[in-house]
Image (cartoon, grey):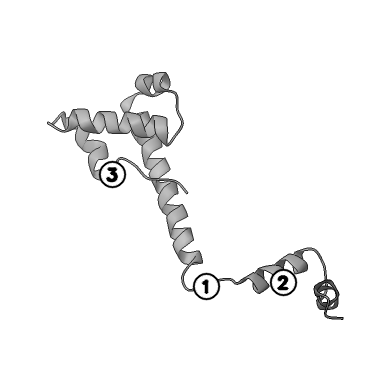
Amino acid sequence: MLTPFCNLINLFSSIEYGPEYEYSFWNEIYGCVNYLNLPYDTVMNLPIYIRKFWIKKHNQRAEEEEQQAREMSDGKRVGGEQLNGYAFMEQGKTDETRMIEKGGI
């Protein structure tokens, strides 16, 4: 699962070169290297708008994955027997075949 970094509030505040600029700048660099797996030299040479674009896209994708994970786990727990049934169905096996393999027939 992806981890968002550099929240959008700080993404554009660094343009003003306020007192937190250096921290925001290095946080962005760290995030790009650590989470986006970009080489340090590449990140340091990227124009600011491109770096921020990639951070924003990464965070959007992380939020989408988190939302999908939440939707999948909304009280819909799947047990072992349900998973086995699904696996047998995917393999084209019938209920009779399942019973034989379980030793029931």
10 Å neighbourhood of mark 3: few (<14), some, or many (≥20)?
Answer: few
Q: Quadrant of residue 38?
A: top left
The CA span between labels 1 and 3 is 32 Å
Q: Quadrant of the C terminus?
A: bottom right
Please name whichever residue, 48 or 83, is drawn nearer the observer in this view of the structure.
83
Among the two numbered marks 1 and 2 on one chain, the one whose residue lies closer to the N terminus: 1
Amino acid beneath label 1: Lys
Q: Residue at x 36, y 34 (%)?
A: 31
**Which numbered disc, 1 or 3, marks the residue that appears first in the sequence?**
3
Q: Residue 65 location in percent, x, y?
A: 47, 53
Q: Residue at x 80, y 63 (%)?
A: 91
Pointer 2: what residue? 85
Q: Local crowd at mark 1 within 10 Å, few (<14), some, or many (≥20)?
A: few
- The location of residue 40, given as percent across then percent down, is 40, 22
**SS category of the residue bearing label 1:** loop
Residue to which mark 1 is pinned = 76
The reply, left or right, for residue 70 in relation to residue 17 is right
**Element type at mark 2:** helix
Residue that label 3 marks: 8
Residue lying farthest bottom? Answer: 105
**Left or right of 80 on screen, residue 40:** left
Q: Quadrant of residue 99?
A: bottom right
Tell me the amino acid under the disc marked 3.
Leu
Instruction: Check disc 2: other Cα within 10 Å, few if <14, some if 14-19, many if 20+.
Output: some
- At 27% from the left and 29% from the top, the residue drawn is 26
Q: Is residue 83 above or below residue 41?
A: below
Q: At 42% from the left edge and 37% from the top edge, which residue is drawn? A: 35
Q: Amino acid at mark 2?
A: Gly
The numbered mark, 2 or 3, whose residue comes first in the sequence reads 3
